[in-house]
């Protein structure tokens, strides 16, 4: 009796599931044709970011042009960096701080020294981010003729290009 039940069960399973299995195989074959293309996710370059590897980041406020550069240009995390700011005109009381643009990473002041009234240089270091994509925002504050001005620049840390 048990043998008969098992035989009948196997017969029913084969009868019901073979057409279903064949349909799955056919769907897989149809899905794999020559016209299929693989889509690769790429990260687009953000044109709003300063690309220090391509040269100075130039910011204009009023009639003053600031040339901001970073060395090393690929902006490695957890390494000493040199920030230079060249102004087209004499400025006073220059201050720079860094903050994370998209996430809070603290406020990092940049200690600058005045080379002359249009050239400043300072050292900084910032931490790394586990996400692999960290944009830093620099706030440049200065005075000209007693009027305070602020310029903002963004850049990608650990920039491979």
Image (tube, helix red, strand yellow):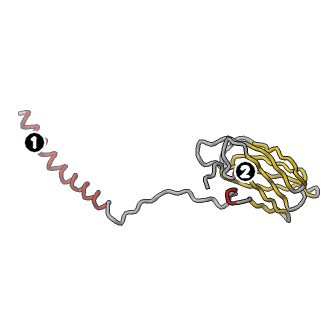
Check if mark 1's residue and mark 2's residue have beta carbons within 8 Å: no
Residue sitting nearer the eye, 161 or 37: 161
- In this picture, residue 100 sits left or right of residue 149: left
Compared across the picture, whether 29 is left or right of 75 comes to: left
Crowding near the residue tagged with mark 2, few <14, some 14–19, many ≥20 C-alpha atoms within 10 Å? some
Sooner in the amino-acid sequence: mark 1 or mark 2: 1
Figure quadrant of the N terminus? top left
User: For residue 8, which numbered disc appears in the image?
Assistant: 1
Q: Position of residue 74 (x, y in %)?
A: 66, 51
Q: Residue at x 75, y 51 (%)?
A: 138
Q: Which residue is mark 2?
A: 71
Q: Is residue 35 above or below residue 136?
A: below
Q: Secondary structure at mark 1?
A: helix
The total number of labels drawn is: 2
Residue at (71, 54) in percent of width and height: 154
Q: Could you say which is closer to the camera, residue 158 or residue 107?
A: 158
Q: Residue 39 sits in which quadrant?
A: bottom left
C-alpha span from label 1 to label 2: 78 Å
Asked whether residue 49 appears in the rendered view, the answer is no
């Amino acid at each position: 009796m048990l043998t008969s039940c098992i035989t009948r069960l196997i017969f029913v399973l084969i009868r019901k599931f073979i057409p279903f299995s064949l349909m799955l195989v056919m769907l897989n074959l149809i899905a794999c044709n020559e016209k299929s293309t693989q889509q690769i996710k790429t990260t687009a370059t953000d044109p709003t970011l300063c690309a220090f590897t391509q040269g100075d980041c130039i910011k204009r406020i009023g009639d003053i042009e600031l040339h901001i550069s970073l060395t090393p240009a690929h902006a490695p995390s957890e390494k000493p960096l040199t920030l230079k700011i060249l102004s087209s005109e004499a400025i006073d009381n220059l201050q720079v701080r860094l903050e994370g643009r998209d996430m809070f990473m603290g406020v990092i002041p940049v200690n600058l020294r005045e080379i002359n009234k249009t050239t400043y240089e300072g050292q900084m270091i910032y931490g790394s981010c586990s996400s692999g994509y960290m944009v830093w925002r620099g706030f440049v504050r200065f005075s000209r003729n007693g009027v305070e001005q602020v310029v903002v620049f963004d850049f990608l840390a650990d920039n491979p290009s």
